[in-house]
Image (tube, helix red, strand yellow):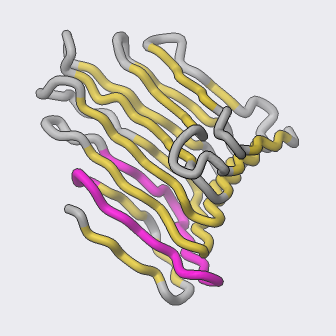
Amino acid sequence: NGHTLTVDANYTCSALSFSSASGTISVSNGIVLTVTNAVTLNSLVGASTACTVSGLGTLNCASLNVGTAVTPTSNSLTAIMTSTLSFLNVTGNVTLTATANGGSKRVDPSLLIGTGTLDANGSITTVNAAGTTSTVSMNTGGGSGTLDLSAAGPFSLSGTGTNVINLNGTGSTVNYSG
């Protein structure tokens, strides 16, 4: 909880997950971290989670997950991933999973793109339970991030719950090549 991991050499790992109230991975300038499977911010049943991916380097991964399927026991929880990394490249889907357990017992995920580039080759997908909200926002932090989308269907949004897609950062750019 609250730890920062700095990647200062090129490394490859199978998976990367965050499961606490806060955590940061920082990839140094000119360095590449390759995650052959998923980068995941886990949801917890009784507490909110958050993480930041930052730095001047590159993180390549097969998929990116914000929030996971849990049965929340506390009210109004969140799972918030913030990216200020120069290059975050996702070859598959970016998935936000919002879960609920009646009333206000829920986990609402958010992906915040502040600066840097998020290159999503798959779809940005939301999986929402009733009464939950999934958020993708570029109007955060520096508000100058870039979102590159190349899937034929760049968004696959849940018909349940609420989807908030805010691509209007003050200096943000969205490129679509699908």
- Magenta-drawn stretch contains 24: yes
The answer to whether residue 140 is above or below residue 160 is: below
The answer to whether residue 91 is above or below residue 76 is: below
- Indicate the quadrant where residue 133 lies: top left
Q: Which residue is at a point 60% across and 75% down the rendered structure image?
A: 57
- Magenta-drawn stretch contains 7: no
Q: Which residue is at a point 44% across and 36% down the rendered structure image?
A: 110
Q: Is residue 53 left or right of residue 150?
A: left
The x and y percentages for residue 173 are 76, 44
> Which quadrant is the N terminus positioned in?
bottom left
Q: Start and end of the magenta stretch?
A: 19-42
Q: Is residue 178 left or right of residue 113?
A: right
> Which quadrant is the C terminus positioned in?
top right
The answer to whether residue 84 is above or below residue 175 is: below
- Please identify the dominant SS of the magenta region: strand
- Indicate the quadrant where residue 19 lies: bottom left
How many dots with numbers? 0
Q: Which residue is at a point 43% across and 64% down the rendered structure image?
A: 15
Q: Is residue 136 left or right of residue 43?
A: right
Q: Which residue is at a point 75% across and 29% down the rendered structure image?
A: 153
The x and y percentages for residue 127 are 47, 25
The answer to whether residue 132 is above or below residue 165 is: above
The x and y percentages for residue 136 are 54, 34
